[in-house]
Image: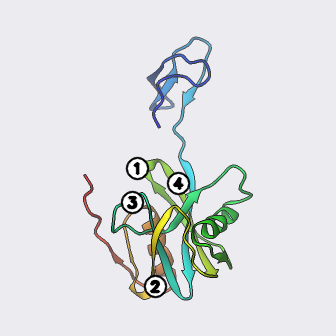
């Protein structure tokens, strides 16, 4: 998100060095607003259902992209663990049987910090309106994409004794 005006006093923002980094600052005398561009926290789930990893395709994504279940960490979520269990239930209709931290990963393109978890889940998969498809992949056959949530999938697969193959990312430009 790019700001042009101060959200506190509505004066124009300008690029100025702050703590050794050029940041947007308010130009008004007496206003100390600095746009820090802090990353947005997101939770991600390596969902394991009936022995397979579940990858899903968001309705907004082009074919053939499938990825982990993700969602924003909401201010009312009691914890990231409860947030990721909520996302699995909302998006797949599955009940989390555990939530195990894998690691944290940067998603620079969207300025997000991803908190990734392994979520064994039970129930019948029922996609919500955000998702248009899913696929089941045995962990021994799973491949990973070399950015953000793909790295979480890679790390979880390695922790399970697999050495997954890296997928080539298509050039979308």
Earlier sequence position, callout 1 versus callout 2: 1
> Going 47% across and 30% down the picture, which residue do you hit?
23
Residue in view at x 51 percent, y 31 percent: 19
Instruction: Please state the horizontal and vertical placement of residue 65, each as a whole percent of the image.
Output: 37, 67
Kindly state the secondary structure of the residue where label 1 is placed. helix
Q: Dot 2 corresponds to which residue?
A: 139
What secondary structure is marked by label 4?
A: strand
Q: Tell me the CA gap for discs 1 and 3.
A: 15 Å
Q: Nearer the viewer, residue 3 or 134?
A: 134
Q: Is label 3 in a helix, a strand or a loop?
A: loop
Q: Nearer the viewer, residue 50 or 123?
A: 123
**Residue count near mark 1 (Cα–Cα under 10 Å), binned few <14, some 14–19, many ≥20:** few
Q: Nearer the viewer, mark 2 or mark 3?
A: 3
Q: Which residue is most to the top?
A: 29
The x and y percentages for residue 2 are 45, 33
Label 3, label 4: how far apart the Cα atoms are: 20 Å
**Label 2's element?**
helix
Dot 2 alpha-carbon crowd within 10 angstroms: few under 14, some 14 to 19, many 20 or more: many
CB atoms of marks 2 and 3 within 8 Å: no
Quarter-wise, where is residue 166 in the image?
Answer: bottom left
Closest to the camera, between mark 3 and mark 4, is 3
Q: Nearer the viewer, mark 1 or mark 3?
A: 3
What whole-number distance in Å separates the C-alpha atoms at marks 4 and 2? 25 Å
Q: Is residue 144 above or below residue 58?
A: below
Q: Which residue is mark 4?
A: 113
Q: Position of residue 59 (x, y in %)?
A: 44, 61
For mark 3, what is the residue? 61
Q: Which mark is residue 109?
A: 1
Answer with mark 2 or mark 3, whichever residue precedes in sequence: 3
Residue 9 vs residue 91, the one in the foreground: 91
Q: CA distance from mark 2 to mark 3?
A: 23 Å
């Amino acid at each position: 998100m790019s700001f042009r005006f101060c959200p506190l006093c509505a004066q124009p923002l300008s690029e100025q060095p702050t703590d050794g980094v050029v940041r947007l600052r308010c130009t008004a005398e007496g206003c100390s607003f600095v746009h820090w561009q802090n990353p947005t926290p997101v939770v991600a789930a390596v969902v394991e259902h009936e022995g397979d990893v579940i990858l899903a395709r968001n309705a907004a994504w082009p074919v053939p992209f499938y990825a982990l279940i993700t969602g924003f960490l909401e201010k009312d979520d009691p914890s990231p663990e409860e947030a990721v269990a909520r996302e699995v239930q909302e998006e797949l209709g599955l009940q989390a049987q555990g939530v195990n931290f894998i690691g944290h990963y940067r998603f620079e393109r969207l300025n997000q910090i991803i908190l990734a978890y392994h979520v064994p889940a039970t129930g019948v998969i029922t996609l919500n309106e955000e998702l248009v498809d899913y696929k089941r992949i045995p962990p021994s056959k799973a491949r990973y994409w070399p950015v953000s949530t793909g790295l979480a999938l890679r790390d979880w697969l390695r922790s399970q004794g697999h050495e997954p193959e890296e997928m080539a990312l298509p050039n979308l430009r």
